[in-house]
Image (tube, rainbow, N blue to C red):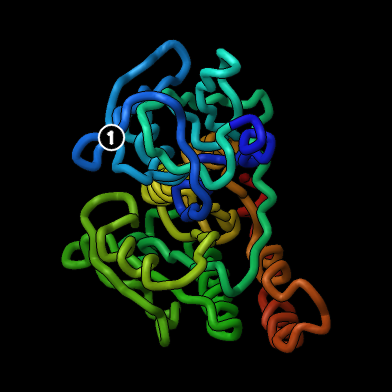
Amino acid sequence: MAAAAAAAAEPASLAHLHNSGHSGGSGGTPGSQSIGGAVPVLFCFSVFARPSTVPHGAGHELLIQKFLSLYGDQIDMHRKFVVQLFAEEWGQYVDLPKGFLVSERCKVRLVPLQIQLTTLGNLTPSSTVFFCCDMQERFRPAIKYFGDIISVGQRLLQGARILGIPVIVTEQYPKGLGSTVQEIDLTGVKLVLPKTKFSMVLPEVEAALAEIPGVRSVVLFGVETHVCIQQTALELVGRGVEVHIVADATSSRSMMDRMFALERLARTGIIVTTSEAVLLQLVADKDHPKFKEIQNLIKASAPESGLLSKV
């Protein structure tokens, strides 16, 4: 055990672990053998300790899933954690060995580190999806700077087509509120869905994301910032997806609602950015084969309105 524990797993965020598998190796702890394929495990977090079971041979990922099912409402997904195993020979917890598989009764705990997980905000076309939220005709007279966010939203969709980035579009109750405005060209988008809930995270959207390999980031824009955008962003972050909200393509009926929503979202680690920053980050280098097209797209855009001054 001591030799195995020396090669302990690196600390990681639960948001990342929740979306990536872990495999390999073998391990175990002294104690009772499993009966009928289920192994008793005591799961400890903070002041809590809850007995449960996992399948024989469960590894790091299944232990994480069990911690989330038991304590998910108390775990900050943006912290880094280590999983530790109680080692009888030491009489204390040690970091879970790499490749550990549960074969006998054991006791594990989840330990939050004191550092906050930093969101780097890197964007690459192969791991990014664009979400266009409820840019509909009936919102035109009510949403502040609506003409500007239509223009910027169309530029983002053109950039997505140039770079081959999937686009998911929703429409809030289109029977009553109308379809997406005509100025926005939906040619080639992956999905256009009606919805009645505020968040874009519908079962069909989750299924579509699951079909796209390696999705790590969502670029989100549309209306309203403090309702559908906010609820979509929070749901995505809760699923371990990094969210970039495009400030110059996102608005509300009230600038106060918009301002406080963006401030709240930024405090949760969501990235508040601009359309030009997103497009240039996606090409990253002037030698990128699509750099000139993206550059020309940005140059062709009209001067920005005062919307960004309202962030």
Question: Foreground: 123 or 248?
Answer: 123
> How many numbered discs?
1
Question: Foreground: 295 or 290?
Answer: 290
In the rendered view, tell whether residue 23 sits above or below residue 264: below
Question: Foreground: 29 or 65?
Answer: 29
What residue lies at 73% left-to-right and 88% top-to-bottom? 289
What residue lies at 24% left-to-right and 51% top-to-bottom? 197
Q: Is residue 247 left or right of residue 215?
A: right
Evaluate whether residue 80 shows in this view: yes
Circle 1 is placed at which residue position? 34
**Quarter location, residue 210:** bottom left
Q: Quadrant of the C terminus?
A: top right
**Quarter location, residue 176:** bottom left
What residue lies at 60% left-to-right and 16% top-to-bottom? 90
What residue lies at 24% left-to-right and 42% top-to-bottom? 37
In the rendered view, tell whether residue 254 sits above or below residue 216: above
Q: Is residue 100 left or right of residue 54?
A: right
Say few, some or many: other residues with alpha carbon within 10 Å of mark 1 (under 14 / 14 to 19 / 20 or more). Answer: some
Q: Is residue 125 left or right of residue 205?
A: right
**Disc 1 element:** loop
Residue 68 screen position, x and y as percent: 38, 35
Question: Foreground: 106 or 89?
Answer: 89
Evaluate whether residue 137 shows in this view: no
Residue occupying the far right of the picture:
286
Residue 245 screen position, x and y as percent: 55, 54
Residue 76 screen position, x and y as percent: 49, 30
Q: Quadrant of the N terminus?
A: top right
Q: Name the kind of residue labelled 1 in the image.
A: Ser
